[in-house]
Image: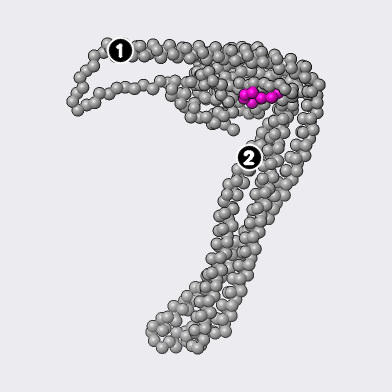
Amino acid sequence: MMNQRPFIIASFNHLSFTVSHSKKILWLLLFLLFAMGTGIAQQNRKELEDKRKKLLKDIEQTSTLLKQTKEDKEATLSRYVTLQKQISKRQQLVETLQAEMQFLLENVERTATVVLALNDDTERLKAEYTKIARHAYRQRLLRSKWLFLLSAQSFNDAFRRWQYLRQYDRYRQRQARLILDTQQTLLDKIKALEDRKREKENLLGTEKRQSQLLGLEMEAKNRLLETLKGDESRLARDLESKQVAATKLNTAIEKVIREEMERIRREEKAAAAAAAANSAATPVAPATPGKAAVTPTATPEVSSISKDFQNNKGKLPWPVKNGVITGHFGRQPHPTIPNIEIVNNGIDIRTDEGAPVRSIFEGTVVGTQFIPGFDYMVILQHGNYYTVYSNLEEVSVKKGDKVAIRQSIGKVSTDRKSNTSEVHFEIWKEKTRLNPQEWVGK
């Protein structure tokens, strides 16, 4: 037994180094695989899942609006524009599903690699543990433990032997736990791999269904386009009447904003004159030694509100709870008539019939008016900014009213010919028109 002691210790140290080195390599491999890919992939995958859910919700809403639209000659353009939006959302959904499947495929490949590594490591740990047990059995190390200790030549030698036996016992226990932990991790990864494969199959089925629906919608769009091409004269007349109505709306908005700006300037001028008169009439008391004179400063309410409004750019709520943008801001080609451009000073939001129209920010009503072609219009002031809500069937506020954010100011109008309901929404900074899509949330 004593002659075999150096061999046992050398074997033990060699196996300890081998297993420790093997474990380090395994976990380094796992860390590299998941640190480089999994963290970023999970974040991107979560973003794709959120985008998919949002697109599905938008498509459901657009589908509802399409069902509400009459299928007749008068409503063809409205159906075509709404269908265009539906197709755009559906295309984004298909692309998102394809991106999700790519992430899942990469995840499956990474997990499969980890499963192989864990399986190899488990087999290696088992083989090493068997080798250690075989050495212990051959040398009768555990059975002759006391003999091994008592045969020491000195107290120091016995103490070293006792430390060796304790270390050997702890090492065996640690190896057993490591095998069990690795096996459990292996089972968890195999389950995760199966879950990812099932999820990939579900996404593949969804993508196939959405692609089929996209093809059907493209065919319907092409049929509507052919119908509209044969009806360009009527569309041109409708466009001309809408342009006349838009001009009247723009003139009314400019008039209200101009009058409001002039009123603000008069009030500021009068306030400045009154402040100067009060300053000249009030004697200035000598400053008391050791005390500083305090000059009160007042921040105009207009500046405060304007600052708040501007700081909320991109986060303001929509003027309706649910809706789809069917008309975008700025100069753009007509959706069906070639070589014709249209100009939109705001955005058009298709929504549900009778939907309440809400203020996107707290402010003051500075104007309400009926505009033929746009029905009722409401203008709210938010400091230097103005929001305009038109195509309202009825109005529930009047000039001078203070309104809160998301407060209902009226109800959207419905075109009885096409059975469509759209609110026209604009944002101005004094006399400058702004793109509302840059101000309201996604």
Answer few, some or many: residues within 10 Å of disc 2's Cα (few below 14, many 20 plus, some between 14 and 19): some
How far apart marks 1 and 2 lie (CA) works out to: 60 Å
**Earlier-in-chain disc, 1 versus 2:** 2
Under mark 1, the amino acid is Asn
Which percent across, then down, holds residue 200?
Answer: 70, 49
The answer to whether 277 is drawn above or below residue 388 in the figure is above
Q: Which residue is mark 2?
A: 51
Residue 355 in view in this figure: no
Q: Which residue is mark 1?
A: 278
Q: Residue at x 51, y 80 (%)?
A: 10
The answer to whether 23 is drawn above or below residue 379 in the figure is below
Q: Residue at x 51, y 86 (%)?
A: 4
Which residue is farthest front?
339
Answer few, some or many: residues within 10 Å of disc 1's Cα (few below 14, many 20 plus, some between 14 and 19): few
As helix, strand or loop, the secondary structure at mark 1 comes to helix
Which percent across, then down, holds residue 145?
Answer: 49, 83
Task: Determine if the magenta segment contains residue 420.
Answer: no
- Boundaries of the magenta span: 328-334
Q: Residue at x 52, y 73 (%)?
A: 17
Looking at the image, residue 241 sits to the left or right of residue 305; the answer is right
Query: 409 or 111, which is in the foreground?
Result: 111
Q: Dividing the image into 4 quarters, which one contains the C terminus?
A: top right
Which percent across, then down, holds residue 55?
Answer: 66, 37
Query: 368 or 83, which is in the foreground?
Result: 83
Contact? badges 1 and 2 (CB < 8 Å): no
Q: Residue at x 52, y 83 (%)?
A: 7
Image quadrant where residue 150 sits: bottom left
Under mark 2, the amino acid is Lys
Residue 211 in view in this figure: yes
Looking at the image, residue 161 sits to the left or right of residue 359; the answer is left
Looking at the image, residue 415 sits to the left or right of residue 154; the answer is right
As helix, strand or loop, the secondary structure at mark 2 comes to helix
